[in-house]
Amino acid sequence: MRKPRSVILPPLRPERLHDLELSEKRLHAALNGCYDFQGRNLNDNKALEYLTAYAVEFLELYLAAFSEYRQYNHTWTDPIKVRALHRAMTCYQEYKDPNSFSFGVYKVSLAKTLDDHVKDLIQQTVDKVKPSPNINANRAELRKTYELQHPGVMVLDICWAASQHYSEWKRWLRNAVKDGSAPDRAFRALLESGKSPREYRKAPRPDGWK
């Protein structure tokens, strides 16, 4: 999991906190059931399965809660993953010493699981809105799909990679550029390639270029 950006998340609404607390109680109940019949030894493999499942549930609850805010954007994702991970591991430390080797291993494992889950969610969204790669594909859909594939991509980098100026981008989006024209083919080729601007065109964009 990457180091989260300096993003201050807004406070959660009480009903969303309640949902998280209920899920947390279910995790505690599940972990309590991971002890042997004498109640002494914790089955680590079984505990990890529950820990993983509920860490993902925490993540989805957090994503649903924060996405209700109008200012929600992709920069919130990393801090949200950290919150989900922290909530899961805070529950687990009541059953396992935080300084133990397995505790650290499980933390790394959960972090990767949450990273992978977010990638899966993004890909599912991309697949839903991904247009057919043909000349009639909606331009707004192409742009949305590309931005989902490359969160935070800058418009000027898109223009530079497509070898088109920003003015052409604006004209293209408002359909002032004909289908099949040079600018149209250039923008579609980039947006349908799935490559980032830097992958598509290796040369760096000059300062002040637009």
Image: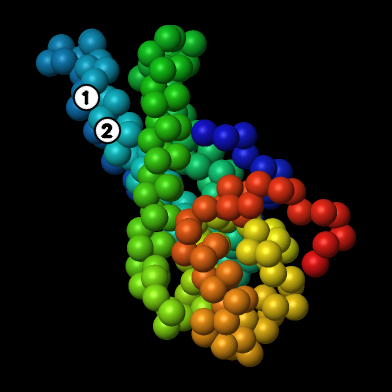
Q: Are marks 1 and 2 in contact (CB under 8 Å)?
A: yes
Residue at screen point 42% across, 47% down = 119
Graded by Cα atoms within 10 Å as few (under 14), some (14 to 19) or many (20 or more), the crowding at tag 2 reads some
Coordinates of residue 116 in the picture (x, y in percent): 40, 41
Coordinates of residue 7 in the picture (x, y in percent): 68, 48
Up the image or down, 77 lies above or below 32; here it is below
Q: CA distance from mark 1 to mark 2?
A: 7 Å
Up the image or down, 155 lies above or below 63; here it is below
Residue beneath disc 1: 46
Q: Amino acid at mark 2?
A: Tyr
Graded by Cα atoms within 10 Å as few (under 14), some (14 to 19) or many (20 or more), the crowding at tag 1 reads some
- Res 26 visible: yes
Q: In terms of depth relative to the viewer, which is nearer, 191 or 46? A: 191
Residue 167: quarter of image: bottom right
Residue beneath disc 2: 50
Q: In terms of depth relative to the viewer, which is nearer, 118 or 51? A: 118
1 left or right of 162?
left
Q: Quadrant of the C terminus?
A: bottom right
- Res 155 visible: no
24 left or right of 44?
right
Coordinates of residue 46 in the picture (x, y in percent): 22, 24
Residue at screen point 42% across, 9% down = 101
Residue positioned most to the left: 37
Coordinates of residue 158 in the picture (x, y in percent): 65, 62
Up the image or down, 57 lies above or below 52; here it is below
Residue positioned most to the right: 208
